[in-house]
Every structure is written in C-alpha cells, then in structure tokens.
Amino acid sequence: MKRRILHAGLYHETHTFLPETTGWADFEVTCGDAVLSKEGDQSPTDGFLGHAREAGWEVVPTIDARAQPSGTVEDDVFERFWSEFESRARPALARGVDACFVVLHGAMVTRSHADPEGEFLSRLRGLPGAAGLPVFGVVDLHASLSARMCAAADALIAYRENPHTDARDAAVRAARLLERCLREGARPRMTLCRLPILWPPPGTGTRDDPMLSLGLFARTAERGNPDLWAVNVIPGFAFADVPDAGASLSAVSTGDPARARAILAEGARLAWSLREAGAVSYPSADEVMRRLVPNPAGPVLLVEPADNIGGGAPGDGTGVLRALLAHGVGNSLVVINDPASVAALAPVSPGSTARLSVGGRGWALDAGPVAMDAVLVSRSDGNFTLEDPRSHLASMGGIRRDMGPCAVVRHRGVTILLTSRKTPPFDLGQLRSQGLEPRDFAVIGVKAAVAHRAAYDPVAAASFYVDTPGPCSSDLASFPYRRIRRPIHPIDRIDTPDFDFS
C-alpha cells in the first residue's frame, strides 16, 4: 500500500525595514492537484515531488504559496494560506496520511506573527490526526529558525550552498530522511543552538569563511555520528527584525540529546571564532570607478548589496548608474526595476529618443530619479527561462521567470535594462533573453549580495563590491532594530558569548 504524504509550501523572505507590505496578490498561489505540475521546475517542491515519485508515495497536495523577497506580510495572507491548507488537510488526515512534508523559507514575518512558520507547524500539529505524524521539510539557508519550528517538526533540512544551487537537492535530502524514518520507524528530534551573531548577507557566502569552515564542520560531524541525521548551518537573514533573527546551528538526531548539544556547542565556538570573517564593508562606487577608468578591461562587476533584490530591495537604486555616467564609462550595463519608465516608452518606436526619469523611487535615501534622453533599443514581455536549472532563482520559484514588460535603452554609453517586476540577477538568461551578452560589456552593475556569483563569476574579469544607498546595507548598526535578541554581534560588544540551546 502506498504511503500517503501531505504536502504544503510557504515561501517568503521578509525584509521588515521596508515601508511596503506584501499582500495576497503578490504571491504565486497553487492549490490542490495543480501543485503536482511543479515537478520538473527545479524548485524545492520539485525535489520533493521527484523523490516521492521514485519512492512510490502518493502525494496529497494542499497549497504552495511563493513570493519574491519584500516587505512585511499582511496578516490576511497567512490566514488565507492557513484556510486553504486546513480545508484540504482535514479531510486528508481523516482519510489517513503517513507523514507531512513542508517546503518553507523560514524567514517570513507578518504584522502579528514574528514566526509564522512556527505558527503554521504548531497549528498543523493541532489538527485531528496530525499530532503523532512525522513532519519533515526543507528551509532556506537564511531562515530565522525558531525553537517553535524545531519543536513542531521532526526534521527541517537547510540548504548548504549560497548561492542556493542545492535548493532542490536539499528537499531531496529531506525526503530521503523522511523515507528512512518511515522505513526504520525511527523518529528524530531537532536541537537548536542560537548564536549571538547577525551577519549581513554578503558575509554568508559558502565559498568563504565563516560559512566555508562551518559547512566543513557540519559534514564532518554527520559522517562521524551515525545517529546524527543532519547538521544545519543557518546564518539567518539580517533584515528580519524578530527575536529569532541571526545565525543558528541545529541538529536532527535519534541519538543522545546531550551528544547533539555537545556537537552544536563545538560548532558554536567555531562560529564565534570566525565572527569577524562575516563582517563586510565596501568603498563607494565613485572610488572604485576612479580606479577603473578610462579603460576597464571587462566585464568588471560593480556589485551593490545595498540594493540586493534577493534581499527585498526595490532594485531601482541609482548609485551605480550615477557613477557610470559621472565617470563617462561607455559600454556599460545596469538593470533598473522601473515600471513607470517602461510604460512611458510604450508609444516610442525602437531607435527613437524619449525623455525619462529612471529609478530612484524605492528608497528614501537614494539621490532620486536620473533624468535622461534615452534611445529605445528594444522591448519585450520579460519572460525567460533560466539557463542554469540549479540557479539560485530556481529555489525561489522554478526555472521560468517573468520580469514583466521590459525595455532596453541607451544613454551616454550606458545600456539600461528596464524591468516592470524586480528580478534578482542570479541567472544570465535574464540578460541574454533581452539580446544582451554580458561578455560584451566593460562594466556591469549587479544588484545582489552573493547569489549572483554562480552566474556572473565565470564571465567576469573582476568584481568589486560598492557602497550605495539602499535598504540592504551591510552597516547593520544603521537599522532601528527593536525585537532582535541583544546583545548581538556586530551591533553590540560581547565579551563572553551566550549560546542559546532549545
């Protein structure tokens, strides 16, 4: 008889300092059997569905809701999600299921819930027939992992890579552990260790310390302890002002809880010794440009993490654009999310010139729109397919992407791709779908922190992080935190760290 596995997905990374809110219309919502069509889209949901098919499971789909990183989620979004889930889960549980599998981001925040994933898992456990079921799932490497989440789930498995090239694989790992649980009848438990560390996103890449050494530690611990099913290294999301924000380590184990705590304590000491490796600061875009002009041998990347779309930023910052224009850098490329400028170009023919005010509206500290006489090169519907099916973008919603109506314009040697929907620059298909070959440009502005590297590093001659105005600044002390646990590094001075076990 086939195992019946209840499935649900809730994916949002919430930047709580943004003035905007995120509503139901901002989510891509798929319900019931339509969720099964996500098999093959290279997302974590696809990873679960693919393994379920191989294992011969019957998947009982409920709801899969995904949205781009953005501001605080409105309460009715969570309640509508729960209503849709509950209406499908109750009859399924009454008929009988063998386990539950959840695909979560782990850093969602609503107005009333600092930990909506923990609230969801707790409500799930409260449904008739669900209290004793195995609950397994996958979370993003930037989750704000909470004690409530760990108490309500048997195993939540985090991505190991940043850029998130293993998001689908992480879901497969979690599904295999669920299969082991069902086969052996063994029920693991989660142990959480929260660290007094808040790393900005650029300090959380897994090719460098601190994450490189912490990842090696985790894999070594797993190999040396048969009862240790998984060790998660989660640097967290610095722009979520919630009590569970910050770095954490967690263990999924069937062994002695004291042994799991001892392993996590060893990892916590290593993380603390590496805390400064996650600290980052950058020169201004003008300073970098002065070093590059007049003839940069490119492509040279100007990476501006403060306007990191993957962290929720508006993607319309003008800092790099202004530096390119001020220093007269020809043959350069930037992407600006500006639906108003795209709309203004609707009556314009390719080859014609239009007066535009580009970007600079999404963040109060930006210098504001750049006025220009721009030549329209081309326009498109903005749809493209990822060149790399393992792209970080696939973890956020599959391999097919929609930037909304787009236009390519040129102004004083700078080519600008204008989009109507902010789209993280994590796959070169974004540019090539618009007739833009990245290797042809001397300088490219990239609004990202780490996740662009898998795509851009192979084509870049050099890469410079630059400081620009934006809501994802790595100067964490500049943000008005109210709810995070204090003291926390690097905002506070800490002489003796306190590792919080749950």
Image (spheres, rainbow, N blue to C red):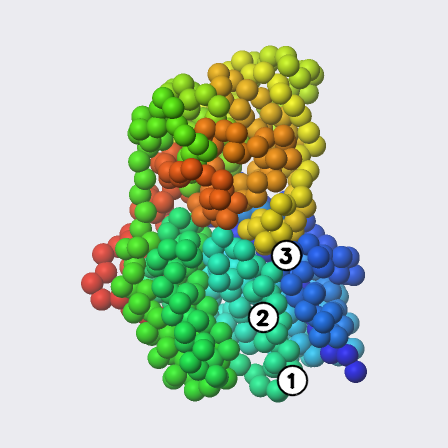
SS state under label 2: helix
Choose the circle earlier in sequence order: 2 or 1.
Answer: 2
Q: Residue at x 39, y 60 (%)?
A: 211
Q: Earlier in the sequence, mark 1 or mark 3?
A: 3
Q: Which residue is mark 2?
A: 174
Viewer-closest of 456 and 141 = 456
Judge left or right: residue 127 versus residue 255: right
Tell me how far mark 1 sits from mark 3, CA to CA: 26 Å
Q: Quadrant of the C terminus?
A: bottom left
Q: Nearer the viewer, residue 92 or 191?
A: 191
The earlier-in-sequence mark between 2 and 3 is 3
Q: Amino acid at mark 1?
A: Arg
Q: Measured from the top left, where is residue 192 in percent x and y?
A: 43, 72
The residue at 67%/76% (across/down) is 99
Q: Could you say which disc has been placed on residue 43 in the image?
A: 3
Q: Which mark is residue 183?
A: 1
x, y percent for residue 322: 42, 24
